[in-house]
Amino acid sequence: MARFRSLRWRLTFLYLGLLSVLLLAGGVAQYFAAREVLFRTNAEALSSEYAADLLAFRRQIGTTTRPAAALRALMLSAQFAKELASGHTSAAIFGANGGLVTTANAGISPDQAPPTLTTTDYLIAISTKPKVYYLAAASDGSTHLAVLNVVRVGNKPIGVVQLSIPTAVIDQTLQADRQLAIVGSLLVLLVALLLSPLIIGRALRPLKQMSDTAGKLAAGDYKQRVAVPKSSDEIGTLAVAFNQMAAGIDQAFEVRRQSEAQMRHFVADASHELRTPLTSIAGYIDVLGRREVVDPETLQTSLAAMQQESARMTRLVNDLLTLTRFESGKAPSRQAVVLDQFVSQALDELSLRDRGAVESRDLQPGVTVRADPEALKQVVNNLAQNALKYAPGAGQHWSVFQQDGRAAIRLEDTGPGISRQDLPHIFERFYRGEKARDRSTGGSGLGLAIAKSIVEAHQGTIEASSEPGQGATFTAWLPLAA
Ligand code: ADP
């Protein structure tokens, strides 16, 4: 029973119900149309018969010799009625006022007694003069088709001749027609009942496939997709949407997998970076602890080295905190910053010239952004520190300008530049260029990653370009203050 509640069967029954109603309505309409056609054809036949009989009768009585009154009397006579009645056809003649003059039938059965219409019918027939005036009329429990022909002498109507046949003759034809229609309709319904579940089932097959695939997706197989039917109907659209959803889920899980992998990498790198100074400090403590007497010089050197390592660790922890702060997606607290004044002050505080750099500035006045000044200062500092580290003694040209609706802070140095292998990776966390792997000069590989996260937290971008041997250029692009 539950089987018949499926969409497939519900659609089948709906379709069959609709088809039955349509067949029934079509059958009824066709029955009445056929009945009307048969009535008209028979009426036309009776009318032609009348015309032929009239002509024959007139010839027989010789119209030209008789005076009009005599002719009129003959035309309305029982003799004329008899001439007209034959087989199933009965005749009745009425006067110009609608009153019955005479009737006649072939006398085979009482059925053939002509039906009596209302006087109005005869009067209408006389006055309207349609081509063939006919109607169905009941007489003694049976129905007749009555055709009214107007009798004229000269052009003047003098009466009405009614020829009628029992409609039973017509009904026999209609009944055969009706039986044929019923058998035909039942056959059509049977074929529809056999074929529609197959056709509908076939059309709904992609839905079944989709529910199977959804089950597999739910079980964790995110690569599952459904075959998209060639037709661009609703099911085709649904299949496309389903696949898009499956791809979206797959992608979301892929992103999650990747970010988990990145997180694991990050934790591993950070632990590694922290372990190095800790191991170093532990080493010094171990050496000092093993000696019974430590000379002051060794103590001083060891303490200085430990201090250096702990400072390095503090820097690293601070860098990690900054990075997580800006990568957490929390919006920085912003205020209007006029870049030329801001960069100028930040560079002054760095005293680059005192640290060996050949510094020059080209700061376009009035370029304003909305930024967290502390964070922005760190971007300038990190770029400057890198140039000091990797391009010692080289030129540092700082510029501030506005281009394509954005503000830019740019540093061009004249140092050794960045190798082609390093360039795509320098903004990655813990990435150190080939030359920077030496721990004495290189940092932790977080400076540019921090700069990038700060600029991006301000809806900006940062880029680097370099031709090895010809210096490096770093540009931070920021949205202009409204
Ligand atoms: P680090 O802490 O090692 O300085 P950064 O993220 O600041 O890390 O820089 C990543 C790498 O980019 C550096 O190791 C270095 O190889 C390269 N780099 C950065 N700035 C410059 C520069 N001005 N000239 C040449 N190389 C640079």
Image (cartoon, rainbow, N blue to C red):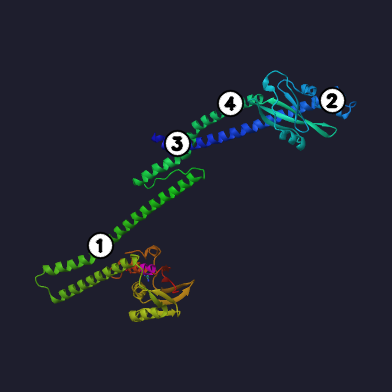
Residue denoted by label 3: 9
Extreme-left residue of the structure: 292
Residue 211, placed above or below residue 319: above
Q: Amino acid at mark 2?
A: Arg
Mark 1 lies within 8 Å of ligand 1 (Cβ measured)? no
The residue drawn where x is 25% and y is 70% is 314
Residue closest to the eye, 132 or 11: 132
From which residue to which does the magenta span run? 452-457
Mark 4 vs mark 3: give the one in front: 4
- Quarter location, residue 180: top right
Looking at the rendered image, the quarter that the N terminus falls into is: top left
Mark 2 vs mark 4, CA separation in Å: 45 Å
**Which residue carries the number 1 mark?**
271
Question: Comparing marks 3 and 2, which lies closer to the viewer?
Answer: 2
Name the residue furthest top: 108
Percent x, y for residue 155? 84, 34
- Marks 1,4: beta carbons within 8 A: no
Q: Amino acid at mark 1?
A: Ser
Whether residue 264 appears in magenta in the rendering, the answer is: no
Q: Earlier in the sequence, mark 3 or mark 2?
A: 3
Numbered circle sitting on residue 179: 4
Picture coordinates of residue 420, whole percent (x, y): 40, 64
Q: Is residue 282 visible?
A: yes
* Image-based side of 259 in relation to 272, left or right: right
Disc 4 and disc 3: Cα gap in Å?
Answer: 30 Å
**How many numbered marks does the figure carry?**
4
Q: Nearer the viewer, mark 1 or mark 2?
A: 2
Q: Looking at the rendering, which quadrant does residue 434 occupy? A: bottom left
What amino acid is found at the position of numbered circle 4 in the picture? Gln
Which image quadrant: the C terminus?
Answer: bottom left
Name the front one of labels 2 and 4. Answer: 2
Residue, disc 2: 58
